[in-house]
Amino acid sequence: MKIISILLSNALLTTSVFASTWSVDESNQRIDLLANEFSLFNINLPTAIKHQKYTKMASSPFVFFRGSAHLYYRDLAAKQLLNKSYFFHTNAKTWIQGDLHTENYGSFDNDQDRIIYDLNDFDESWVTSYLYDVWRASISIALIAKQNNFSDEYTESFIDAFSESYLDQLADFSDNNNEKD
């Protein structure tokens, strides 16, 4: 039961970085909601695997965030945050990675036998608003920065650099069929 308490603690810390739109009263309801979500989402996992997963997720808010993408999407839908964004447009859809965070990058060989560093996990990719990836990666960056004691100013600069680079890459790909190396 201690693991679940730590896990829920990390969930609340992650939520505070993600969206400060929850009130104190909602936090108590959120603990119940999270416990229910974990039970339902992991219902088919064997007990030992479930315990192992929860133990890992309890190690830090970032690791919790990595293991709870379903909550991220649930929260965005529940608060309708995406639709309220100034940058949201129903026609601004592209392939997204779907679970974009700082540990979904790595090196691998491309089809020309060159080693490249890029995104390396696409099992949750889908066509939708680019904002899902930008926000998820930004939250990931904020959690890692907080974990490593970076100031808010540095954290904001990390997120700005990532966001600008992401949008620049989208602009490079728009209106053409050329794939970049």
Image (cartoon, grey):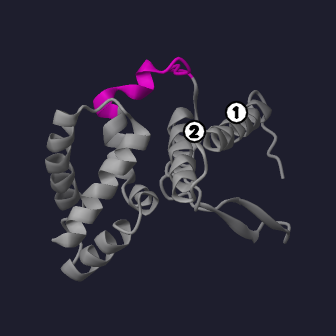
| Residue 50, image quadrant | bottom left
Q: Distance between the residues labelled 1 and 2?
A: 9 Å
Q: Looking at the image, which residue is at 67% across and 36% down?
A: 160
Q: Who is closer to the viewer here, 77 or 90?
A: 77
Q: In this view, does 33 lie above or below 21?
A: below
Q: Looking at the image, which residue is at 41% across and 57% down?
A: 61
What secondary structure is marked by label 2? helix
Q: Is residue 161 magenta?
A: no
Q: Position of residue 162 (x, y in %)?
A: 68, 42
Q: Is residue 171 above or below residue 101?
A: above
Start and end of the magenta stretch?
77-91
Asked whether disc 1 touches disc 2, contact meaning CB atoms under 8 Å apart, the reply is yes
| Residue 103, image quadrant | bottom right
Task: First in sequence, mark 1 or 2: give its number.
Answer: 2
Q: Name the residue under label 2.
A: 134
Q: In this view, does 165 lie above or below 91?
A: below
Q: What residue type is labelled 2?
A: Val
Q: Name the residue under label 1.
A: 167
What secondary structure is marked by label 1? helix
Q: Is residue 177 above or below residue 114?
A: above
Q: Looking at the image, which residue is at 74% across and 30% down?
A: 174
